Amino acid sequence: MRKIFLVLAAALFLGAALCGAASASEIKLGYINMLKVEKESLAGKQALKTLEKMAADKQAKIEERRKEIEKMQKELDKQSSIISADERQRREDKLQREYKTYQRYYSDSQDELSKKKEELANKMFDEVTGVIKKYGKEEGYTLILDRSVVLYAPEAVDITDKIIKAYDNTKAPAPTKKIKK
């Protein structure tokens, strides 16, 4: 339903833009594939590395906690015949609390990763949008759309690689000047 709305909105916008630009000598259209920008741009690759490292760190801590709980369970199983009923109940309660803490940490970790992914995606989207606007003005585009709302377009109007290059240029470190002595 959302895609249909986006396609219809794009069609209406395109129609209005074309009517307004009908008197112009040239209508220049283009589209970009934002998913490709996310995957192939320097910033997108860096964001993916950041998320992968964060996920690996969280997974290592989760695994460590899981092993601790397993160890506690094995010890309890081993000693259950030689400890008192009160001691067994105390250890079972402690194991239950540890397991709940583990589940909470797992859930919190997933939420944190999701929030970080959304934060990075939103930042990147804003930056790429700025690059697209600048590129569109400089190159005289009438309209630039996201590939997800384009039903058909020839490859000749795909400017994704140009946008990736322009975006990467905004992220590249400024060249340093050598000072001659």
Image (tube, rainbow, N blue to C red):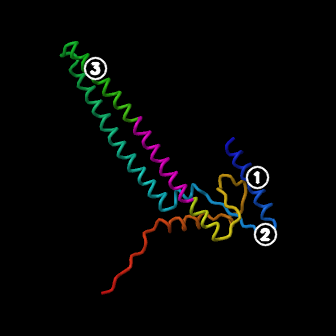
Q: Amino acid at mark 3?
A: Glu
User: Residue shown at 47%/47% (left/top)?
Assistant: 117
Rendering coords of residue 150 (x, y %): 70, 55
Q: Considering only vertical position in the picture, is 4 above or below 72?
A: below
* Distance of label 3 from label 2 (alpha carbons): 78 Å
Left or right of 141, for residue 71 = left
Q: Amino acid at mark 1?
A: Leu
The magenta-colored residue range is 107-128
Q: For the residue carrying disc 2, how many other residues have a C-alpha within 10 Å: few (<14), some (14-19), or many (20+)?
A: few
The overriding secondary structure of the stretch rendered in magenta is helix
Give the residue furthest to the top. 85
Q: Which residue is mark 1?
A: 12
- Dot placed on the residue nearer the N-terminal end, 1 or 2: 1
Q: Amino acid at mark 2?
A: Ala
User: Residue shown at 77%/57% (left/top)?
Assistant: 16
Q: Which element carries disc 1, helix, strand or loop? A: helix
Give the residue furthest to the bottom. 181
Q: Is residue 96 magenta?
A: no
Q: Considering only vertical position in the picture, is 76 above or below 27?
A: above
Q: Nearest the camera: 180 or 158?
A: 180
User: Residue shown at 61%/63% (left/top)?
Assistant: 133
Q: Which residue is mark 3?
A: 92
- Dot placed on the residue nearer the N-terminal end, 3 or 2: 2
Rendering coords of residue 104 (x, y %): 38, 32
Frontmost of labels 3 and 2 is 2
* Distance of label 1 from label 2 (alpha carbons): 19 Å
Q: Nearest the camera: 21 or 34?
A: 21
* Distance of label 1 from label 3 (alpha carbons): 64 Å
